[in-house]
Image (spheres, rainbow, N blue to C red):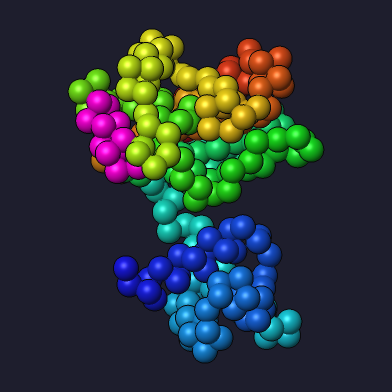
Amino acid sequence: MVKSAVRVFELLEMFEAERRPLRVADIVERLGAPQSSVSMLLKSLVARGYMEFDAAKREYCPSIRISFLGDWTTRMPDRPEAIQDAMRRLAAETGETVLLGRQSGLQLQYLSVIESQHALRFSPSPGTMRPIHRSAIGILLMSQLEDEQIGLLLRRYNAEVGRAGHPAKIAETLRAVALARDQGHYESANLATTGAGVIAALVQTLIRGQRLGLGIGAPIERLHRRRKQLLTAVLAAARKC
């Protein structure tokens, strides 16, 4: 990988996690990178208008321009909301953790996470990878594939990863995928995290017809108790975006 390109995205992901302006020393500490290279990177991004610098406070912060770069990829022309809008509204409406995920090879990657305000909550970090067959969003995304494709994917997982960890149970996963196809949504319990579950629905993007998974995550007891409300909310949000 090109180190300078990787560092740009590490920088932006760091600001996404921190959600506040930072000084160079703070950024250097969090990235574990040389101060000289971090300073050059920040100055380059300021010059291009992607980063703002407050000279009085000596703080850097991503500019508004960053937020518009990929907005078109998550806003379907015939839908009233972008995916980010739907996530924020869903989080405010339900009070639970809201997740957005995509397939990344053999894994499910959480692209964005809005954490619940409950003390007891399910909150993986953005960027977290999970085996695709061990997440509600992953099961739902696989429901868009043919069973033969799923079998190949899981056998590859078992060959590359499963020997050192927990191999995928192909027949069991195919049954879960079939249920997701029939329902148009999927609910997990104790699949990736003991005591937690996710209710997920599909959303479409403009990138080659790619589907993403939008989910609500919570402790199982609360998820089951509020199932009807949470399922209605996540399906409505998926339709709107």
Tag count in the figure?
A: 0
Looking at the rendered image, the quarter that the N terminus falls into is bottom left
Question: Horizontal and vertical percent for residue 14?
Answer: 57, 63
Question: Between residues 239 and 117, which one lies in front from this camera angle?
Answer: 117
- Residue 27 x %, y %: 61, 75
Q: In the picture shown, does residue 96 fall above or below 69?
A: above
Span shown in magenta: 150-161
Q: In percent of the image, x 66 and y 22: which residue is there?
A: 220
Residue that extends furthest to the right in the rendered view of this protein: 119
Examine the rendering and report whether any part of residue 224 can be seen: yes
Image position, residue 75 (x, y; %): 43, 41
Quarter of the image for residue 109 reads: top left
What residue is at 67 percent from the left and 70 percent from the top? 21
Horizontally, residue 201 falls left or right of residue 85, namely: left
User: Viewer-proximal residue, 140 or 82?
Assistant: 140
| Relative image position of residue 44 (x, y in whole percent) | 46, 82
Q: Residue at x 45, y 71 (%)?
A: 7
Relative to 208, say whether 15 is above or below. Answer: below
Is 150 above or below relative to 45?
Answer: above
Q: Nearer the viewer, residue 160 or 11?
A: 160
